[in-house]
Amino acid sequence: MSPSSMKGASEGRNTLRLINAELSIARAKLVSDINLEVKAGEIVVLLGPNGAGKSSVLNLLSGQRRPSHGQALMAGIDIGDWPLRDKAKRMAVLAQTSTLSFAYKVEDVVGLGRIPHDSGRVKNQVIVEQCLELMDVLPLRRRLYTELSGGEQQRVQLARVLAQSYVDDDDAQCSFLLLDEPTSALDLSHQQLILQSCRDRASKNCGVVMVLHDLNLAFRYADRLVLLDKGRVVAQGSAEQLADAQLIRSVYGVDAHIVKHPLHGCPSVVF
Amino acid sequence: MAHLNARPLIVFLIVMVPLVLIAALFIGPVISSVETVGNALVGNADNVEQLIVRDIRMPRAVFALLCGALLASCGAVCQGLFRNPLADPSLIGVTGGASMGASLVIALGFIAGPIMTSLFAISMGAFLGGSLATFFVYRLSINERGASVSVMLLAGIAVTAFASAVTNLCEFFSDNEHLRRISIWRMGSLEGASWMELLSLFVLLIVVLVILIRASQSLNALLLGESEARHLGIDVDSLKRRIILVVAMAVGICVAMAGTISFVGLIVPHLIRILIGPDHRYLTFGSALGGGLLLLIADTLARTSFAPEEVPVGVITALAGAPFFIFMLRQRRNSIGG
């Protein structure tokens, strides 16, 4: 399968794009020939084995790293050329590991997500509460972050980026949410909760890109999947297109069987 | 532990400042009468005792307040910058670097003429030495999880050792006159500051506090990590430069004027953080108030506890601070990596 063609794309006002992007660090090529377009309103999931380059792609999209070759564009403008503050208003990023060793209250950590915005205290308070509620951490709001479990901390960090990428209903601007393994420390019900919140965000003109390891979760919630291996895009497309036993075997080296989910109708993998 | 509300604590500290200041005026080898202090405060001094209160105790108490406020607020932001609650200017080499810079200026002064030995030149030397040391230790110890404790403290030790070697060399090659100047300055004391110097220090404190408090939200974001702060729209590199320069300047000038006073920048922010949490919007100012109070109390103790002998105030803060630091190190050993 070839990467989906980029030719049809317009100048891309509501998109995040990588065009023939390559990232090399100290002469080691981490990823190359990456063509990827994320539109506002869709969830794109990056898949692949460890070391496939998923985080590198996310780093290119977030502007954390500039491509060694090729381009990374948000709304048609090179991501590195965006003023930091303006970029932060439109893009929130959650890294794989977030460490905070100072004893902030949970609600204050989430409040940090509002730093780039000038929405005022009262409104921020409402947004923070809403995001705490969404991530099921509202009862913990006055607890100290440092005293929480790993999964609780992850949900608090997620609430923080949700608060940052919060867009008003009357605000026409799109935003982007980039999440690196947001479910890694979460139990089953909270994994569903996160993905459902991302779905809701996408319906509010937000483009979501995330790295996931759970294929079934990805098949169920993603609009588009991007399968990476050894720094290259191996396949890109819908769940139906990527749910291919042979493809999964060739990338992950495991035998998989594809079945249809009895309830949701999306493909599921059993091993 | 739940935090207190920040505002009442800050109001309480603000109220405490004049109270402790006035109390310190009464206390000396001889406890002064209300009449004496009252007269001295309105500027009259018609006997020796009133002169002592007005011209010796008062400037010294104000000096302690200003110095303590500078050191503690710098400690607070230093810990934010390093994302590590153990980063005290005196432990990470800022103070050592500043001493080196200052003594180099004094020692080389005889080459460049008498103007070089002025306080301004010494302060400049201290500032340059201090910023060099901070920058060096920061570059060496920072990683994606904040500054590693061991690397940061070891780098601090190395910088301090190097700086004190240079300072010793300066002494070794100085003539008698300069040697005397360096050693008097090195012992450090809050004694004998002129009102002009105190006024400049006060202006410096205001400038430093304005810069640091304006950077509060950026520092808060930085506690999440450098790239997280960038994703929140903070220009991290410019923030770091600003903080390092301000800390080096403030600590450098404190060192130039009062010598080495350690641990104030460690104890005070830590206590304030326990009370009201790590939010820099309150922490920095609260630390300034707390630091001023602590150093004033410490200096009053230094003046009186072994009267008529005076011990340098740095001795008192180190006596109290070192055990506190060891206690914190034990506490933190498990929670902060490597």
Image (cartoon, coloured by chain):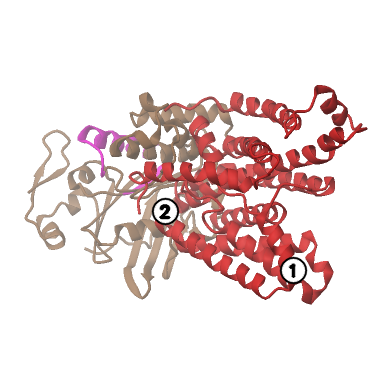
Determine whether, in the image, residue A251 is placed left or right of residue A10: left
At x 68% / y 66%, what residue is drawn?
A: B103
Compare residues A108 and A55 and report the one nearer the observer.
Answer: A108
Residue placed farthest to the front in the image?
B308
In terms of secondary structure, where does tag 2 sit?
A: helix
At x 8% / y 52%, what residue is drawn?
A: A256
Whichever of labels 2 and 1 marks the residue nearer the N terminus, that label is 2
Which chain is tinted brown?
A
Residue B196: horizontal and vertical position, in percent?
84, 48
Which chain is tinted red?
B
Determine whether, in the image, residue B192 is placed left or right of residue B232: right
Q: Is residue A41 within the magenta segment?
A: no
The reply to whether residue A41 is in sight is: no
Q: Is residue A204 within the magenta segment?
A: yes
Residue that label 1 marks: B178
- The magenta segment is A184-210
Residue B149's disc is 2
Determine whether, in the image, residue B232 is placed left or right of residue A52: right
Label 2–label 1 contact, CB within 8 A? no
In terms of secondary structure, where does tag 1 sit?
A: helix
The reply to whether residue B318 is in sight is: yes
Picture quarter containing residue B14?
top right
Compare residues B233 and B116 and report the one nearer the observer.
Answer: B116
Compare residues B56 and B222 and report the one nearer the observer.
Answer: B56
